[in-house]
Amino acid sequence: MSAPAQPPGRPHGQPSGLPMVRIRAVRKRFGPLEVLKGIDLDVPAGSVVCVVGPSGSGKSTLLRCVNRLETIDSGRIWVNGELMGYAERGGRLHALRPAELSRQQRGIGMVFQRFHLFPHRTAIENVMEGPVTVLRTPAAQARRQAAELLERVGLADRAHHYPAQLSGGQQQRVAIARSLAMRPSLMLFDEPTSALDPELVQEVLAVMRDLAASGMTMMVVTHEMSFAREVGDQLVFMDDGVVVERGDPREVLAAPRHDRLRAFLGQVL
Ligand SMILES: Nc1ncnc2c1ncn2[C@@H]1O[C@H](COP(=O)(O)OP(=O)(O)OP(=O)(O)O)[C@@H](O)[C@H]1O
Ligand SMILES: [Mg+2]
């Protein structure tokens, strides 16, 4: 399969129906602790799934299994039609070679709570890094694309600033631009606004909202319920390694069916 392409742009809220991510019966344990206890989840291409749940419920682990930063103990995960981490031949699973796994992982962008920018590189150099070193994009072209991406996240005028010269919200927007520079077909966000001062949260959510509107497929772990309500196509509530409740965010938030979700919402809303 060729390099993962961005899904065709389409108005948000009209996913194509094809799953970009398909998760089936996924289990994961760390030693004696079973953290994911049989997760099934589909993320249609072009849609946004918001994952919420109490601390320790397995949200980050689930995202990390999707891009195979963690291996899974059983079950299957497909991204963009490809089984993550394995080739299936004659009914047998064969672990992918590292180069093949890296190719799969390159198609999946991930943004964390902490930004992990290179401190000694400017914003634009941070965004260019992946395309130049991994995709072998010529520097001039990578620089043009990086400038466009910085403009897209509202940072055209900060291109030559170092991370220490940027606010947390600006650094997180550079981190998003840096992920997008690899032209992912899926973006994973793990509490991207949790480390930010409250006044900086909205500028990052606005960038994520634009990205969703452009047709990007997104899995977003967040405590921002208004974002989930406005932007999410699906809300998934996890507790203790299982999906307890899921559905249209507006319906789920207006009328949660499970006590555990009601209790959780009572704490975060
Ligand atoms: N590498 C690891 N080794 C051992 N235990 C781990 C590891 N990573 C996560 N865990 C444990 O797995 C459980 C789920 O962790 P995870 O980070 O997925 O939860 P979470 O829902 O993202 O929580 P939070 O809201 O605090 O980020 C926790 O009990 C955690 O301590
Ligand atoms: Mg987490």
Image: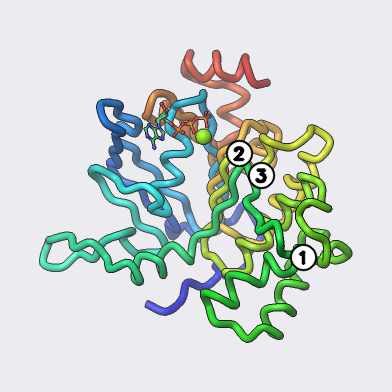
Q: Which residue position holds label 1?
A: 150
- Which image quadrant: the C terminus? top right
Which quadrant of the view contains residue 58?
top left
Q: Real-space Cα distance between discs 2 and 1?
A: 21 Å
Amino acid type, mark 2: Glu
**How far is mark 2 from mark 3, CA to CA?**
15 Å
- Determine the secondary structure under disc 3: helix
Q: Which residue lies most toward the front here?
A: 120
Ligand 2 near label 2 (Cβ, under 8 Å)? Answer: yes
Of callouts 2 and 3, which one flags the residue occurring earlier in the amino acid sequence? 2
Q: Position of residue 1 (x, y in %)?
A: 37, 77
Nearer to us: label 3 or label 1: 1
What residue sits right under mark 2 in the picture? 191
Image side of residue 171 versus residue 161, left or right: left
Check disc 1 and report its element: helix, strand or loop.
helix
- Crowding around mark 2 (Cα neighbors within 10 Å: few <14, some 14 to 19, many 20+) is many
Amino acid tagged 3? Val
Please identify the residue farthest to the right as the structure is shown: 157
List the residue tagged with mark 3: 231
Labels 3 and 1: the sequence-earlier one? 1
Q: Residue at x 35, y 41 (%)?
A: 40
Assess disc 1: are there few (<14), some (14-19) or many (≥20) residues with their C-alpha within 10 Å of its C-alpha: many
**Are the residues at dot 3 and dot 1 in contact (C-beta closer than 8 Å)?**
no
Q: Position of residue 233 (x, y in %)?
A: 57, 44
In depth, the one of 30 and 28 nearer the eye is: 30
For the point 11% across and 67% down, which residue is it?
A: 90
Image quadrant in which you'd find residue 52 = top right
Would residue 85 be found to the left or right of residue 234 on screen? left
Amino acid at circle 1: Leu
